[in-house]
Image (cartoon, rainbow, N blue to C red):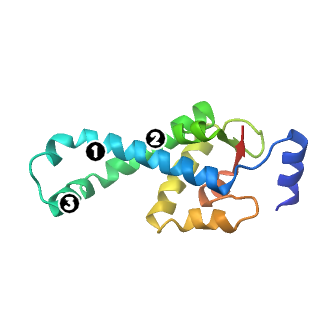
């Protein structure tokens, strides 16, 4: 682990969130956002469409779905330091420099690169499994850590 990060965590008496807690939080968040999309498209989906038609319908809203994901991540991380999934798992996102909630620019950066990572087969998330600081691509680009509350 980066010595600077180790020193900050030690000084602030903070521990990194486990990979399992982060994974469960991410699953909760994905389920919540997917539920919102399904509710928004429920009338269209409910018109006896075939499975292929439903997939094409959902894919036609890919840009809107991505914007929704970025907005959700950025707002909650900036405002509360955690998304709903992270709040449930009792973990939060902190800016490495301030050890506080990320500001709007950092939160937006993190949200955008989170979606980019998902678009590239979740490689950015897999990176976090191998990284000593447990930082995913979106954590690296935003200079954030996910820590236990």
Q: Is there any visible trace of residue 68 in the rendered image?
A: no
Q: Alpha-carbon neighbours of circle 2 within 10 Å: few (<14), some, or many (≥20)? A: some
Q: CA distance from mark 1 to mark 2?
A: 17 Å
Q: CA distance from mark 3 to mark 1?
A: 13 Å
Question: Do the residues bearing badges 2 and 3 touch, measured as CB atoms within 8 Å?
Answer: no
Could you say whether the residue bearing mark 3 is in a helix, strand or loop? helix
The circle on residue 71 is 2
Q: Is there any visible trace of residue 4 in the rendered image?
A: yes
Q: CA distance from mark 2 to mark 3?
A: 23 Å
Where does residue 102 sit, x and y in percent of width and height?
Answer: 66, 39
Which residue has dot 3 on it?
56
Where does residue 26 sit, x and y in percent of width and height?
Answer: 53, 50
- Position of residue 135 relative to residue 39, above or below, is below
Q: Alpha-carbon neighbours of circle 1 within 10 Å: few (<14), some, or many (≥20)? A: some
Among the two numbered marks 2 and 3 on one chain, the one whose residue lies closer to the N terminus: 3
Among the two numbered marks 1 and 2 on one chain, the one whose residue lies closer to the N terminus: 1
Instruction: Report the quarter where the N terminus lies.
Output: bottom right
Instruction: Classify residue 115 as left or right of residue 106.
Output: left
Question: Which residue is at the front of the view, 104 or 79?
Answer: 79
- Position of residue 118 relative to residue 97, above or below, is below
Instruction: Classify residue 110 as left or right of residue 34.
Output: right
Q: Alpha-carbon neighbours of circle 3 within 10 Å: few (<14), some, or many (≥20)? A: few
Could you say whether the residue bearing mark 2 is in a helix, strand or loop? helix
Where does residue 84 sit, x and y in percent of width and height?
Answer: 52, 37
């Amino acid at each position: 682990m980066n010595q600077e990060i180790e020193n900050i965590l030690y000084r602030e008496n903070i521990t990194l969130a486990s990979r399992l807690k982060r994974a469960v939080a991410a699953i909760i968040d994905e389920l919540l956002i997917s539920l919102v999309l399904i509710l928004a498209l429920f009338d269209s989906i409910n018109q006896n469409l075939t499975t292929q038609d439903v997939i094409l319908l959902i894919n036609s809203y890919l840009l809107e779905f991505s914007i929704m994901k970025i907005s959700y991540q950025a707002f909650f991380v900036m405002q509360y330091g955690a998304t709903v999934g992270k709040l449930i798992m009792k973990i939060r996102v902190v800016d490495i420099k301030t050890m506080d909630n990320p500001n709007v620019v950092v939160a937006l950066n993190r949200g955008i690169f989170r979606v980019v990572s998902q678009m590239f087969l979740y490689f950015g998330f897999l990176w976090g499994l191998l990284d000593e600081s447990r930082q995913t691509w979106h954590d690296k680009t935003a200079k954030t850590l996910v820590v236990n509350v």
